[in-house]
Image (tube, coloured by chain):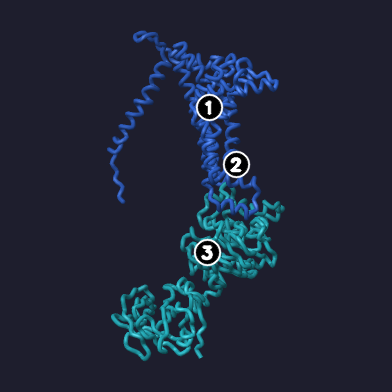
Chain colours: A blue, B cyan
Amino acid sequence: MNKVYNNRAWWLILPMLLLVAFSAVIPLMTVVNYSVQDVFDANTRFFTGTEWFKEMLNDPALQAAVLRQFAFSLTILAIEVPLGIGIALIMPKKGWQASAALILVTMPLLIPWNVVGSIWQIFTRGDIGLMGWSLRELGYGYNITSNPVDAWATIILMDVWHWTSLIALLCYSGLRSIPDAYYQAARIDRASKWAVFRYIQLPKLTNVLVIGVLLRFMHSFMIYAEPFVLTGGGPGSSTTFLSQSLTTMAIGQQDLGPSAAFSLIYFLIILLVTWVFYTAIMNMQKDNNKGA
Amino acid sequence: MAEITLKSLAHTYLANPQSPQDYAIREMNHVWQQGGAYALLGPSGCGKSTLLNIISGLLEPSSGEVLFDGEVVNELPPEARNIAQVFQFPVIYDTMTVYDNLAFPLRNVKTPEARVHERVMEVADVLELTSQLKRRAKNLTADEKQKVSMGRGLVRDDVSAILFDEPLTVIDPQLKWTLRRKLKEIHQRFQITMVYVTHDQLEASTFADKIAVMYEGQVVQFGTPRELFETPNHTFVGYFIGSPGMNFLDVFARDGVVWAGDTALTVGQGVRDAIEKATSSNIKLGIRPEFIEVHTDPVEGGMSAQVDHAQDLGTYSIVYLTLGGLSLKARIEEDQMTPTGKAWLRFPDERLGLYVDEYRVEIDHE
């Protein structure tokens, strides 16, 4: 077949460009616009340059929120990834049990964020919540509104409850795609269960795990509704994560300039971490290719 | 090293088998001798792979016994049977190098590293993989991957037999030749029992000393490629082996004459006696297309047939004929005249096979 070269075909991407401009680029530019100016009203504004950025980067409360955010995201990844793989490995492979397990595992994913927050808010109450009441009856003075450790543990538990299923489902589909011959060959090669996991299952899961980890990282880094409903960011600011700080600043205090600068920094952090992670994984695979 | 015996072995995938059709393997007895190169030949779905998986222990037979050197191994899992199996699609461990792939079966049983190295180097040398040892197995070509799969079977010195389940399906035609020769070489060098499953008669006959032809869950004939060609035991073998397959004519004897449809056949006394003796009504005469004498002019004892068309295949032609309402194929070498319109056929007696109820019956040719 003859390939026709016609650069006018570039015009075909015009509708897409317009759509993206309208829905993403222009709003983003508004944010950029706010971040470099101090706007009083429609006619009064001053150019501030990098002032907001400097202020934001040096704000101790925000620095603390960033560290808290990283601690949270890394913790839930460290729990959800191995747990998700584990669940995927023990999920039944066929029959009605497989369907039942799939439905059960999918359930938490279908619940909206703020509903999850409300469920756990009630669940952890000392008077009527099953968990809160039980823990107190067992003699532990569990209280998420006064004890930061309790609040943290509960938020992590809640996120694990809500999102481990995603990793489990991704891994389950990855495991299903491994042909039987691999397991048969492994039996004939007398491989141990661990060797089967290490050399057959885990390598085949790499791709779905990259997707899973990226999704979970971005998601958890932007977590808002669940902790907001559960703890409101407290006690003190112990569970105030980045998006909540941002919302307080932008909506609560109407500090549009600083919040715009902060949004951009927030966006760049996510972009940077995601890019580093993705490049690292892809490089690992490339090294494999070269036989290093 | 082992002699593999299958004793009244049968297998079904159904919980309550009713009829013989429900069995993937119908009751059979078979012996694979130590050190032989065997092929298991048959069409798709005839139970070849099932049989192979039963031997390797991936499947447990519904009834009967599998014996290695006289010892029942039914209960033993594959890892305890010292059997290697190469699958249709190459199975390699992606993240490992070729060296680690080959070393894997040895390391799994904690072989000393010095011994592992020795064995891997030896096998890599035989399979011509030495220069690839440091590469990641993931990036090999299909034939190299399949060589690695085979290598994992060869590397173990305790292996009693290697089973091949259509191992060359994904390999390019030219490379098939090389790999098949390599297998043969390996067989001669290590004297390991090898069972090679395939649906390709050429592959079977170039690899194996003896071929077991399977049909509907049974081994219908076990013999050398020559035996399968010259004296097929079952109509299916006649039809499946050879290209084109054997001709079969439904015949009956009446008034001392053998009839095929409305045509009287010119056949010897021995053939006629055998047909008259048969008690079944399912009687067939089989003759290979290669053995039909085709004449363009009337000959003594020739039966006249209609020539439908001829197919020129280069060094020979296939002539499609109708004899007494029954179709026949004959193979004609390029130096012979290809008949048109009418032809006169002769069936040499010693080339005729008589099949009663699909199985071959001996003919006494005097």
**Residue A176 image offset from top left, x and y in percent:** 53, 45
Q: Is disc 1 on the same chain as disc 2?
A: yes
Nearest to viewer (mark 2 / mark 3): 3
Q: Vertical placement of A55 versus B326: above or below?
A: above
Q: Vertical placement of A168 versus A140: above or below?
A: below
With B362 as the anchor, is B78 left or right in this view? right
Residue located at (47% from left, 74% from top)? B235
Give yes or no for contact between labels 1 and 3 (Cβ–Cβ under 8 Å): no
Q: Residues within 10 Å of mark 1 (few under 14, many from 20)?
A: many
Residue B303 visible in this rendered orientation of the protein: yes
Q: Nearer the viewer, residue A65 or B141?
A: A65
Q: Quadrant of residue A82?
A: top right
Real-space Cα separation, disc 2 to disc 1, in angstroms: 26 Å
Amino acid type, residue under disc 3 in the picture: Ser
Nearest to viewer (mark 1 / mark 3): 3
Residue B178 visible in this rendered orientation of the protein: no
Please name the residue that numbered disc 3 is placed on: B19
Nearest to viewer (mark 2 / mark 1): 2
Please name the residue that numbered disc 1 is placed on: A220
Q: Nearer the viewer, residue A114 or A193?
A: A114
